[in-house]
Image (tube, rainbow, N blue to C red):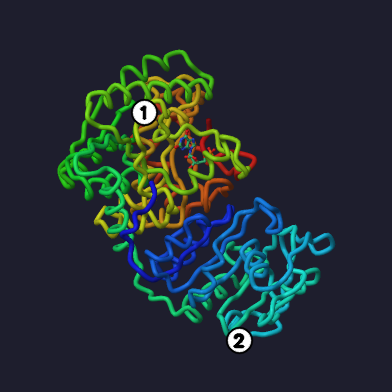
Amino acid sequence: MSQPHSGPSGGVLIVDFGAQYCQLIARRVRELGVYSRITVPERALFTFEHMRPDAVILSGGPRSVYEHDAPQLDAAILQKGVPVLGICYGLQWLAQHSGGLVTPAQSGAEYGRTELEVTDAADLLAGCRQRGIVWMSHGDKVAKLGPGFLVLAKSEPCPFAVVGDRARRFFGLQFHPEVAHTEDGAIMLKNFVLGIAKCRTDWNPGNIVDNKVAAVKKLVGHDGEVVMGLSGGVDSSVAAVIIHRAIGDRLHCVFVDNGLLRAGERDGVERLFREEHHMDLRVVDASDRFLDELRGVTDPERKRKIIGRIFIEVFRQEAKRCRKAHFLGQGTLYPDVIESVAAHGGATSTIKSHHNVGGLPEDLDMTLVEPLRDLFKDEARAIGRTMGLPASLVDRQPFPGPGLAVRCLGEVTREKLVPLRAADKIVREEIEAKGLHKGLWQYFAVHVPQKTVGVKGDARVYEDICVLRVVSSQDAMTADWELLPVDVLKRISNRILNEVKGFSRVCLDVSSKPPATIEWE
Ligand code: XMP
């Protein structure tokens, strides 16, 4: 879903030359409280006229500026009198259009970690360490600077690592300030956006919401209808509330109870969205169908596939009921976009093979409405808070699309789900009561169908194992196990062994990812 031209004026116009990190540049600008928009080079001048930005950032890109079909920008943008910051390819384009020369790097190619030596620490590099680490990724280099440009910093193989023409307020960085590996990258961007361009710092989750709501209104029109699967997770919930704010009861939400939910989940979703947010929410109880089809299935991948397929079938049936709905709402976040591009053969190489309940097939023949598509998870959370969603929802831990099925090892049965659900509730209650969840990525119980001997009230019991999985992580790609305080562990263990029938033993999972995954299946 593209943003309309109804955004505010001012801010930063980011020209995307095909960069891997373009959304990250936008995110860094948002973190400074400044409005930004990304545009493709061909539309840059047009967007400039509508937006009247205070500054332009030219992104990196995979091509070489001297190739005849390399992405080009109308050089008239350099006559507008606003500061320009070129990053990597953006610097090379800027150099080429300011009387400089760009050539293949040969000896000057740099990839990854490089030491930068600051030689002129005014304006753009003010406050940066004299020798810091930056993240390079370029095969071309600026061989000669145009008139008016000075060198502000260099690296061993790259004499023009940071350059600037102070009179025209044009600057260039041969490396990526937007990535976390560049030590003072955030300072450089701040110096450019706030110090040099003097952008207003009035962009916050509140007006991001207004902007998204306006975009949904524009896309869906006056009488369009949207159907959407609501899982009760952060992403679909925040997206649904934005769409609802835009089009009210022309949004139709569907919540599929697959019988694999945690205790209280379905009731919580109904209460919040139907009673508090007054949304049109249809709850479909398909638990029998899911559990029947899972009968006898023990292979984890088969379990996932079955659950994914039934979800799509149930949702498709429900979507057909809303005959007038030509739009499909989804809570897709920017990292999901990167992953799905990668999954379809794009350049980004990290691929998760997870089934995401939001990921419906395109042959539903509906236009996607994805208001969070250019945002990151923490930004979706901030927006959710602004719109009044409760902390219990906004800060909740991720829950996998296949639900408790991937924590109920082997065959999933109603009988095994009962103790698992009860133990999981205890784990959540005890951790949340102490506020420990704030530093954790996920915390849950796993049902291991291996009988061990125990004694309960003078009688011998022979029951299954409950495993406690508690991990910290930044993005779920890697994770570490976390040790809860001993008194909390004792309470959890005592409560599970006393209150839950079906477990005779509680064990702790002390495995990091990799090599273990977070979920057990
Ligand atoms: P793993 O087990 O691969 O999980 O370390 C990484 C993160 O992804 C979640 N997860 C899923 N999420 N559909 C989802 O939407 C899935 O099929 C799925 N499988 C795992 C998991 O909870 C963890 O946060």
Query: Which residue is pictured at 51% across the width and 36% down the height?
Result: 519
- Residue 303, compared with residue 151, is above or below; it is above
Which element type, helix, strand or loop, lies under badge 1?
loop
- Residue farthest to the right? 107
- The x, y position of residue 292, in whole percent, is 37, 14
Q: Which mark is residue 145?
A: none
Residue 130 visible: no
Q: What residue does disc 1 label?
A: 365
- The x, y position of residue 187, in whole percent, is 55, 75
414 or 239, nearer to the observer? 239
Which element type, helix, strand or loop, lies under badge 2?
loop
Looking at the image, is mark 2 or mark 1 earlier in the sequence? 2
Q: Is the C-beta of the residue carrying label 1 under 8 Å from the nearest atom of ligand 1? A: no
The three-letter amino acid code for the residue at tag 2 is Ala
The three-letter amino acid code for the residue at tag 1 is Asp
Q: What residue does disc 2 label?
A: 122
391 or 143, nearer to the observer? 143
